[in-house]
Image: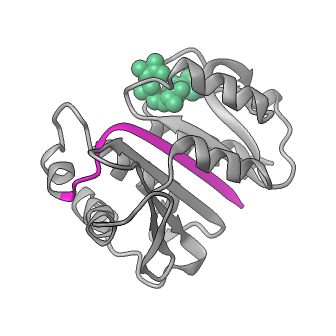
Amino acid sequence: MRTFVLRARAAPTDSQKLLASIGKEAHAEILAHTLMNAVFVAQSHRADVRVYLVLESTQDFSRTVFFDINAMHELGGFDERALLGKIARALDASRGMGKEEARPVESGVTVRTVSFERLVLELAENHQLYVMDRKGTPIREQSFQGNSCFLLTDHIPMPKNTFHTLERLGTKKLSLGSKMLFASQCVVLIHHELDQR
Ligand SMILES: C[S@@+](CC[C@H](N)C(=O)[O-])C[C@H]1O[C@@H](n2cnc3c(N)ncnc32)[C@H](O)[C@@H]1O
């Protein structure tokens, strides 16, 4: 199982604002591209992939939209409109939710009002966490056993405090080279590397 978490710090939790932010400061397209590259290959999709998108620009609680590909019946298209449409529907389904609640959206898709910090605490119980960082261990030198979970951000870096939390959870820093890439490009390279093993 490969798990990806995108911490989208600039992404609005209001669906209309999210859709209006494509190509603007919040860059909602980052979510679509990351989901697309995590899930789809040409003419098919990958099995055994889970994606958590954590949207943090909010008036109340972060929204974590969870995609369990093995449980999804209807993946829909892989274009930005289709993917952001799925995320927007999950956000609409989350209206009125209290803190740390969960609601099913469709088969394989769940929305939760859970923060990034809370989510990684949970994932650390049965995954080795890797935070993607240009200064980390080169991915080629890293061995992978069991469930791996890769943590990424949008264009806004992780706050310093998060790194302390991640360290306590035994998170390893993993590098894909010295060039600063998009999160979605990191996902492709991670898949590629693991596909070779
Ligand atoms: C556009 S980058 C984030 C840029 C942000 N301004 C920063 O300084 O972290 C998006 C995500 O890709 C990861 N990333 C980008 N290039 C990378 C590389 N060469 N190796 C590992 N992770 C990388 C970053 O750590 C981040 O999680």
Quarter holding the N terminus is bottom right
Seen at 77% across and 51% down, the residue is 127
Q: x and y percent of residue 167 in the render?
A: 74, 26
As for residue 8 lying within the magenta part, the answer is yes
Of all residues, the one furthest to the front in this rendering is: 98
Question: What's drawn in magenta, residue-wise?
Answer: 1-15
* Left or right position of 3 against 89: right
Seen at 51% across and 17% down, the residue is 179
Q: x and y percent of residue 24 in the render?
A: 16, 35
Q: Main secondary structure of the magenta part?
A: strand
Structure colour scheme: one colour
Q: x and y percent of residue 104 in the render?
A: 45, 78
How many numbered dots are placed on residues in this image? Answer: 0
Seen at 29% across and 51% down, the residue is 13
Q: Is residue 71 visible?
A: yes
As for residue 68 lying within the magenta part, the answer is no
Q: Quadrant of residue 59?
A: top left
